[in-house]
Image (cartoon, rainbow, N blue to C red):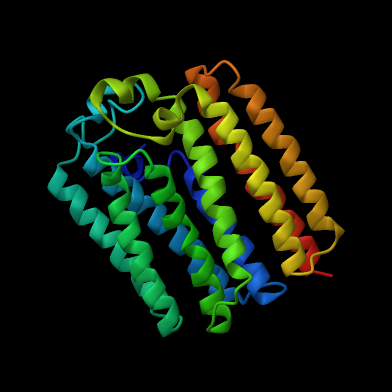
Amino acid sequence: MNVYARLMRLDKPVGIYLLLWPTLWALFLAADGWPKLDLLLIFTLGVVLMRSAGCVINDYADRNIDKFIERTQYRPITSGEISATNALKIFFGLISVAFGLVLLTNLLTMQLAVVAALLAILYPFTKRWTHLPQFVLGTAFAMSVPMAFAATNNFIPASAWWIFAATIIWTVIYDTMYAMSDREEDIKIGVKSTAILFATYDRLILGLLQIALILVFFKISESFKMSIFFDISILLASTLMVYHQFLIKNREKTVCFKAFLHNNYIGMVIFIGIALSVAQ
């Protein structure tokens, strides 16, 4: 695949899906049905652009350490296929196009987009000074939620923040699983993560976070007066979480990474429950 496509991780679209699902949750709940086609297109394209930009700035920030990690040593910047300067140009180009899309919405959405962009830029550097970069990533991903409500209704109801919270919790869960696959190498090179912070309590804390996520989903159901379809989707998502706990039980690198990838189905199941509920 083209080196620039690999830089933006277009060959690994699961990151797009993980960002897209909460965006769609918010769009459909904000519209109480199918969102307007223009907003659906704007936010879907925005997700692709921002996830791509996030991958570029992440690889730029990690260009001097990716070479020491088996899974990342052949990424385009650290391997020398693309210069750091060109990577920055690509990043700002993607950000500019994404913000151009936001200009088609309203002032409140534009203001929130600035916060989202700043968080996206900040995230890759946080792993140097805090064990909670996954929380920063979750907040960056969750900014799509108030943006969706702002673009749809020009205000953000209090109930929207439950979706915001669910997105943060979910992101911390799956990105900790991702970090578990790199934990030993990260410790050696001095990179911080929740996987390192949680240490031997990782599965327990992830289990508690999964329970918290389920409870927040039920709060969303109550706040938005969802139908039984959404409650069924929560139960299905809960089953998937149990499966993920089974996958990570021995903390094997490849299986932890598989659990991370499999979280895509949680986002999908919850979206289907929301779509069926608001379609009634």
Q: Is residue 42 left or right of residue 95?
A: right
The percent position of residue 186, horizontal first and vertical second, equals: 32, 26
**Quarter of the figure that contains the N terminus:** top left
Residue 17 in view (yes/no): no
Q: Residue at x 59, y 41 (%)?
A: 209
Q: Is residue 258 left or right of residue 53?
A: right
Q: Residue at x 70, y 62 (%)?
A: 220
Q: Residue at x 57, y 66 (%)?
A: 161
Say above or below: 163 vs 232: below
Say above or below: 249 vs 116: above
In which quadrant of the rendered view does residue 108 lie? Answer: bottom left
Residue 7 in view (yes/no): yes
The percent position of residue 197, horizontal first and vertical second, equals: 41, 31
In which quadrant of the rendered view does residue 10 lie? Answer: top left
Say above or below: 41 vs 81: below
Count of marks overlaid on the render? 0
Q: Nearer the viewer, residue 209 or 221?
A: 209
**Quarter of the figure that contains the C terminus:** bottom right
Q: Residue at x 75, y 36 (%)?
A: 239
Q: Is residue 229 left or right of residue 177?
A: right
The percent position of residue 168, horizontal first and vertical second, equals: 51, 52
The percent position of residue 37, horizontal first and vertical second, equals: 60, 74
